[in-house]
Image: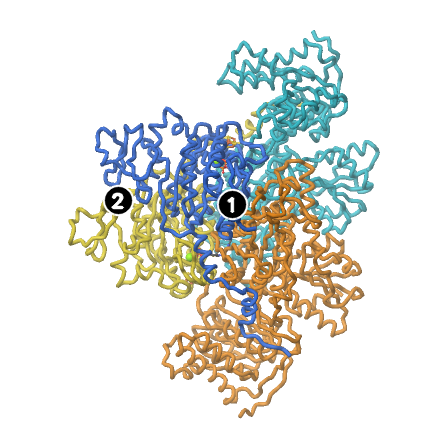
Chain colours: A orange, B cyan, C blue, D yellow
Amino acid sequence: MSTHSIIELENVVIKFAGDSGDGVQLTGNQLAETNALFGNDISTFPDFPAEIRAPIGTIPGVSGFQLHFSSQPVLTPGDKYDVLVALNAAALKTNIKQLKPGGILIVNSEGFDSKNLRLAKIEESENPLINGSLDAFKVFQIELTKLTKLAVKPFALGNKDAERCKNMYVLGLVYWLYNRGIDNTIAFLTRQFKKNEVIANANIAALKAGYYYGETTEIFLEKYLVKAADTTKGLYRSINGNQATAFGLLGASIRANLPLFLGTYPITPASDILHELSKHKGYNVYSFQAEDEIAGVCAAIGASYGGSIGVTTSSGPGIALKTEAIGLATMLELPLVICNIQRGGPSTGLPTKTEQADLLQALYGRNGECPIVVIAACSPSNCYEMAYLAVKIALEHTVPVMFLSDGYIANGAEPWLIQDLETMPPILPKYISSNIANAKYQPYLRDENLVRSIAIPGSVGLEHRIGGLEKENITGNISYDPLNHELMVKIRAEKVAMVANTLPLQTFENGNETSKILIIGWGSTYGAITQAVSELQNEGIDVAQIHIKYINPLPKNIGELIQPFDKILVAELNNGQLINLIRANHLKDAKGINKIQGQPFQIIEIKEAIKQAL
Amino acid sequence: MSTHSIIELENVVIKFAGDSGDGVQLTGNQLAETNALFGNDISTFPDFPAEIRAPIGTIPGVSGFQLHFSSQPVLTPGDKYDVLVALNAAALKTNIKQLKPGGILIVNSEGFDSKNLRLAKIEESENPLINGSLDAFKVFQIELTKLTKLAVKPFALGNKDAERCKNMYVLGLVYWLYNRGIDNTIAFLTRQFKKNEVIANANIAALKAGYYYGETTEIFLEKYLVKAADTTKGLYRSINGNQATAFGLLGASIRANLPLFLGTYPITPASDILHELSKHKGYNVYSFQAEDEIAGVCAAIGASYGGSIGVTTSSGPGIALKTEAIGLATMLELPLVICNIQRGGPSTGLPTKTEQADLLQALYGRNGECPIVVIAACSPSNCYEMAYLAVKIALEHTVPVMFLSDGYIANGAEPWLIQDLETMPPILPKYISSNIANAKYQPYLRDENLVRSIAIPGSVGLEHRIGGLEKENITGNISYDPLNHELMVKIRAEKVAMVANTLPLQTFENGNETSKILIIGWGSTYGAITQAVSELQNEGIDVAQIHIKYINPLPKNIGELIQPFDKILVAELNNGQLINLIRANHLKDAKGINKIQGQPFQIIEIKEAIKQAL
Amino acid sequence: MHLENNIQLFTAKDLETDQEVRWCPGCGDYAILNSVQKILPELGRSKNEFVFISGIGCSSRFPYYMDTYGLHSIHGRAASVATGLKLTRPKLSVWVITGDGDSLSIGGNHFIHTLRRNPDMNILLFNNQIYGLTKGQFSPTSEIGKITKSSPIGSVDSPFNPLALSLGANATFIARTMDRDAKHQQEMYRRAYYHKGTSLVEIYQNCNVFNDGAFEVFTDKSQKPLTALFLENNQPLLFDEGRKGIILDGLKPKLVATEDVSINDLFVHDEGDKTKAFILTQFFDEEEFPRPFGVIYVSKEKATFDDLMNLQIESTEIADKAKAFKELLYSKNYWEKK
Amino acid sequence: MHLENNIQLFTAKDLETDQEVRWCPGCGDYAILNSVQKILPELGRSKNEFVFISGIGCSSRFPYYMDTYGLHSIHGRAASVATGLKLTRPKLSVWVITGDGDSLSIGGNHFIHTLRRNPDMNILLFNNQIYGLTKGQFSPTSEIGKITKSSPIGSVDSPFNPLALSLGANATFIARTMDRDAKHQQEMYRRAYYHKGTSLVEIYQNCNVFNDGAFEVFTDKSQKPLTALFLENNQPLLFDEGRKGIILDGLKPKLVATEDVSINDLFVHDEGDKTKAFILTQFFDEEEFPRPFGVIYVSKEKATFDDLMNLQIESTEIADKAKAFKELLYSKNYWEKK
Ligand SMILES: Cc1ncc(C[n+]2csc(CCOP(=O)(O)OP(=O)(O)O)c2C)c(N)n1
Ligand SMILES: Cc1ncc(C[n+]2csc(CCOP(=O)(O)OP(=O)(O)O)c2C)c(N)n1
Ligand code: SF4
Ligand code: SF4
Ligand SMILES: [Mg+2]
Ligand SMILES: [Mg+2]
């Protein structure tokens, strides 16, 4: 058996990097799943190239998958890698800076031939495998293609198909290195290629060969063990943000017992919500891929008008196009959920990269006084709850709700303590039915929360007209009356503000009002900020942390929590947006921690910024 | 001749009100022009009903024209009327509240028959002409239709045409009352109806008859005189904001010696800019009425790319649709002027009413970090200068510039001390020509203001590609590099911020840093605020006033000016927008004076708000 | 919330709302409103089952004057709003009210996409060849050279042929009628209603304020016989009170005096023949041909978008959704932490 | 700033940029790029006079690979950007590069409006019947029932017939070609270039990653003879190496074996005949007919939008603009304050 000694580690950050065609995403996902099933806490960060496949072997063609697995609670995919698996020269070049000194570097030495070097724009003389630049790392060179082909020889695959198995070979090796079984991946491969047994078996053979390569050769002297994490008890699954968003919407539709209507137009990184929901028509899900974003949101408004849950999903450029129609929904006072999966902007920007730069657009990006509810998910799995709540708020308050997520959490995965539908709060839409209406139906008559009751077309005796012109309160008739307009503008604002009555109060994630400094974040930066603050607290630095999920309206006590602090930092992946609200509302000289690189925060970046501010 | 005594007045506010078909706008415009020619300072406020003509005689069908003429400088059309001319019951009902106690009320008594009362929703028993409700005013009832028909009898017009002359009859009467000659209007009528002499002569006859009615009957015991105003010397004309905007754009095109390209789609209240510019093709003006707002702005971008001045004009809903393309122009770093003639929102809102509620949209209404220059005109004639400057800034800084105006100043007129083109600052666009380019052209190479030099398609040897994806600084090649993205976001922001270097410093309109309170305004509220502050200063209340024309970037010294004040008010025709900037940037507890009624501020409203805040 | 089964009778009068009709006196829109109000009660459905959805424009104020369900949306987007409604509430009778600017200018994309998808609804296109609401600019149906506020020396935009465009977008029902002919209008609206799929009715509508007389040549009693061709299915193309007709010479339509030809040689209208329909839509640019009114083309072959989508939903419908959802959440490998 | 008069010769090689071409290996876009690069030098103009404007999509990356002027705009709006450029710089040779999603989905409205206005530019529509860039959703040209990421149980959208739509939008030049036939492509691009007005070339382009083989039935050597019909003006419609042909039975096209009919009875292609063009565009839904490739329709009658607009500008051009502007400012009653 193995003579290798086993070293226990608290956590490992591993990065797989290779060409887009190398199956890197699949490899990473398998390791993530296997570790999650084993009981590690995990966080992943898939980082793909721009939408179109760049030429093989080039820098723009590099696809990466980062995985953090740990015996401790994990909040981010990690800053620097303990292990880098680089399948070609371009992948190495792109990622080597992030490998910790002394870290393990597994390279496919066949990915460093003249052609690959040229494609990666590396001079032959600068070949990192020979020029000594990798001396700081534990480098393991493997002739991956050759070994893989040997392994799958019995299956007589074509050259290309044979080569394609190399990701499984390397995965097998990593499984061995981290002391994990390969059964889960074998089961996966069998399922995945059930229509092509030869391919399935070849992949399994490559996986096994990789595993045994670790076991039998002596290239590694040690193997490692990351124990199961001690997280909350219960049933877990791995989930990414877009899946969670789709499930949250779907769950809300089931719970509210109303059809879900998605009117949308594909756009990176939001399209996967469409892809997921369109699989679930059987739940009364209408997925309408419209001719453009405007048609998508307008159809969603039409569906809302008809008593379904109107939802639209998009990202920056598409959200910009929807702003006029969101104004209409505001004026009609119909429920509408707009999911903005933010990406790098402005304009087409960096479509596959993450950013939080659409917050001010969410708050103010419409003509006229047009407040809507804005909420933001803070992690992949949190998208489930927030998307569910978006539907609940929209239906119960007859308002448009903007749900903010971003490319980072949309594509990143983490274990999710599955939230069964029964544990979610009930959803009570505001429809009026024919029978109670003996008096004339007044479409803009309001309840104590200023919410109007909606009569759905088809209902007997409740015929009425609504539209985008200013309307008289209560009757809904067109009105040009000056005071009525002011009243209506204030009512629409107040109605949104009153949503805060039903929201949870804000709490500190860390620290409290006596802490020396307060850091405020929102959305996907939750993991990095929380980890940074915990680490600082472990270092004895007393930092308070607030993470805002409800941005408009803000939780009612936010002023109270902020009030005691002289030093306030607002961390955002933009050039300073939420900070404007904090400063304007609370007149505090908050300072920004900003990063606009299409990449999430690293823990260290936050820590250093806090330390500097102290 | 006249035995009437003449009373001298400092100023008069007169309102004409009647049915949309009554020619009220024309009547008001004639009086305004005649008074302006005479030398009064004037300000007008046309207030028409929603776009479609409402049924004759109803409240929604009332059209109004308010005119303030004075021997003193005039800044607003006035709060309350000294004179109300009401041509029917609905017109009276809508306007009587604004007539000063003791004011003159001229009514067409034939507009108060049963039918008219019913259409105006007035009970027969509540007929204001008989129920005593008008006792506080000097009421003059005239059988206008009958008298007019008598006057035009010699011309044997049809019934309708004859009746149509009644506005001229009443105008004649008003001319007499305010001691003005009728020659200017006679000349106008002759010009206007040069193809139909009979109609011209009938109208002139009615005008004269009205005039002589004043002279010969004894209904008025006094007549009034408002002397010429003592304003700056020079040549004046009357101008409204949309005309001034069109002229400003046109002037800039002539001065820059570049074609002007307007890509637009009609919308109230912006359409008149299109109408005006499309008359001037001979100046190298391309007016392209596109299929929608998106095509309009995109065509303008195409024209800018080609070396013309790309301009697009719209209002709320249309601006919302353009936001994606404005992001593209920002990314391309091409000049673009976007004129937003604001109207009541949200959504379709109150299309013919005024509002300032698109400021935050102008600043933040795009996806991603996408700052553009935002400037706002403060009066009808100021639109000329600001539109001119919008072009200048766009061309010289290769940025999109949003020019804000609104329905109030767009349609309102005032005398304009004509600004000859030679007196305007020169415009120096940033084009690069073939001959200097021996080295490779770098489209994103920048000068000291971070402005790039543009090579226009067609130029030999400067072929290059630009687009909406993030690009490498200097070369303009597509770049996904994280640090480059941050650099570019900051450069684009800094480039806009640096525009402030070329802008005038902010000054106090009134008061100074030792004043007790500061009031800040922007855009069309200039007249009302300035008038209110002057009046308060006359009353001995020391108020400082700042009126901001350059909103992004703000003038560099704005912080300095604001700093000394504990009490700051921000007056806006919205629910509080500029105030957010003041509070966030300067951490001052500024308070809002807000009105959201589709109507401009009244002077008294501002005065009272200031007094309360003291 | 759901449609009732027993039909509630109602009359045209019941369709009037308490809102004053606010079009200019003499506007063609009144006649269209009347005709729609006239036919609705005859369709054998309750009032509450009708929904009128409009964009923005003079014409788009229409829903305010119909005491049914109504939504006055934003400029150009009525068809999209209607699609969302119709998909999710397929039993409603959905009508889109739109103008030439609303549906052919800003809304052109939704217009053609709606036609190709073919949801079962009726589009009434009020074509007055002008932007009425914004006070008179040329529209995509205005003739080239037209002088308007935005084209003071004549527009340089060559117009759409709306029915040819619709045919090109694979419309399954296209018809043309005019505001001045109440009976013909009503017949067209009835036909549109009964067609399963998207029915497009182009209505020549006079804007007497900004484009008066645009269609007078077709609507005026004295000129109509020579300029308007009323189509009847399976009938030869005849006009001028039967004195003139149209034959096909190969693929080319030609005008003939009926006395010169046998009735059997005339071009016989066939609503189901797309090539014939195409030829009829081309009686547009050429001045000599009379303008066809009536149903130009109907195809019954194409399934409706709402049927197809609802079929997918119904055929996969899950009985116990909460249970299935639970299974879905647990369908990927999950694990228990104890 | 202005076009130079003396033509600068250049070669296809000169059109390559320093940017790596980033389409998937095997993508049909490469062949199109090559063909365009091939013909440009032959057109007798300098390189600097060409401008390529694209929207967003795989196809829209095209301008980055052409060492001419190029603008990669936003999704669906290339035709609008190009219109603004062409109007103001009428002497440039403007090419719009677009995909089926870009120009027929989000950009459908600009597409049809551009065709009706007829500015003198060339639209190359890369039709791969899929959204490539966003990784494989159905597009408005995908067939009904198509299984994609966004239609896992089949799309319920009935597709556009792009050429029929273009004809309905009054296009003055429509043609179809395929990525796999370099010679035919080049001929079509040349024809498009020389047509004065908007030229639309639909290119069947294989997306080998998300929709591989969509057009194989037309491009595959062995099937092509039976499925593809190559049009030549004034020539009878023949395919299957002359063994089969098409006749018109009244208005109905019919397939025939050439040996059964006289050559004179065959349907003769006439690029200028709109009805014939219509019939050809309908060889689309019916599977039995071969798909026509080539120039389907050209009309030379319509003036171009850029000509008409520039004519208005030139014919009213003011010599001394500053002086005229002064007069304009003072044209309304003005007064002097002394
Ligand atoms: C987004 C947007 N753009 C422009 C407008 C202004 N607008 C309102 S109606 C209209 C055109 C009306 O023409 P049409 O559709 O033909 O209707 P009509 O008034 O002639 O019945 C325009 C341009 C608007 N309301 N919204
Ligand atoms: C406003 C906007 N909406 C959506 C997208 C996302 N998007 C980019 S390209 C594309 C469709 C691409 O399809 P097609 O035009 O057929 O080009 P192809 O990639 O197939 O060549 C979509 C939906 C976008 N970039 N901008
Ligand atoms: S403007 Fe024209 S279309 Fe509009 S209501 Fe008046 S007449 Fe009718
Ligand atoms: S995704 Fe398809 S269309 Fe796009 S580059 Fe790849 S093969 Fe070509
Ligand atoms: Mg119209
Ligand atoms: Mg495509």
- Tell me: D234 left or right of A559: left
Residue A467 at least partly seen:
no
Marks 1 and 2, Cα distance to the nearest angstrom?
42 Å
Q: Position of residue B560 (x, y in %)?
A: 76, 47
Quarter containing the C terminus of chain A: bottom right
Pointer 2 chain: D
Labels 1 and 2 positioned on one and the same chain? no
User: Disc number at residue C49?
Assistant: 1
| Residue for point 70% across, 8% down | B2
Q: Is residue A267 above or below residue D81?
A: below
Q: Is residue A184 above or below residue C158?
A: below
Q: Position of residue D65 (x, y in %)?
A: 42, 58
Q: Quadrant of residue D60?
A: bottom left
Q: Position of residue D107 (x, y in %)?
A: 46, 49
In the image, C246 versus B595, the foreground residue is C246
In the image, A79 versus B50, the foreground residue is B50
The residue type indicated by label 2 comes to: Leu
Q: Residue furthest top?
A: B1
Q: Disc 1 or disc 2, which is closer to the eye?
A: 1
Q: Residue furthest front?
A: C6
Q: Position of residue A466 (x, y in %)?
A: 58, 43
Pointer 1 chain: C
- Tell me: B288 left or right of D281: right
The residue type indicated by label 1 comes to: Glu
Asked if disc 2 is less than 8 Å from ligand 6, the answer is: no
Query: Which residue is label 2 attached to?
Result: D251
In the image, C208 versus B528, the foreground residue is C208
Q: Quadrant of residue A192?
A: bottom left
Residue A438 at least partly seen:
yes
